[in-house]
Image (cartoon, helix red, strand yellow):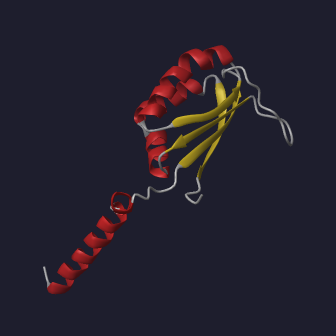
Amino acid sequence: MNARSKIGLVMLTCATLGALGREALHGEPGPPAYLIGQIDVINPDGYAKEYLPKAREIIKAHGGKLVAAAGAAATGSQVVAVDGEPPKRVVIYMYPSMAALRAWRNDPAYVQVRAVGEKYATYHTFAVEGSVAN
């Protein structure tokens, strides 16, 4: 390996370590990520019994925390329409980071569970990063 290649490799390594070490060195975690789901539940009983318990277990394993849920198969609270028609179910989950959220969504175990959920519901989900400023 020539000198230029070695210098380039050292620079790349330093940049990577710097990016990875930001949280450890400065105590500044990246922003949390929020998953917002509008779910059209067709069969609340099947959804609640066959999908939710397994899905929640996998969500928790990836650091997901339920922030809010309402509508079909939820705790009984209803989705309140502000503009337009409300969806049948709304959920909001917070993950430690967008990477954690993506890891959950791409987890093979969740992909299998999601196929079960799709027998009972249609999903419209999206994610946004939270603000780190106070």
Q: Residue drawn 65% across and 14% down?
A: 45
In the image, residue 6 lies at what x, y percent? Answer: 18, 79
In the image, residue 47 lies at what x, y percent? Answer: 61, 20
Residue 9: quadrant of the picture: bottom left
Tally of marks: 0
Q: Residue drawn 48% across and 23% down?
A: 54
- Farthest residue to the left: give it: 1
**In the picture, which quadrant includes the C terminus?**
bottom right
Above or below, 84 relative to 7 = above
Q: Residue drawn 62% across and 46% down?
A: 126
Specify whether 103 is left or right of 91: left
Specify whether 59 is left or right of 77: left
Specify whether 11 is left or right of 55: left
**Pick the front one: 103 or 76:** 76
**In the picture, which quadrant includes the N terminus?**
bottom left
Specify whether 114 is left or right of 100: right
In the image, residue 41 lies at what x, y percent? Answer: 69, 25
In the image, residue 105 lies at what x, y percent? Answer: 49, 40
Q: Residue drawn 26% across and 70% down?
A: 13
Above or below, 127 relative to 73 = below
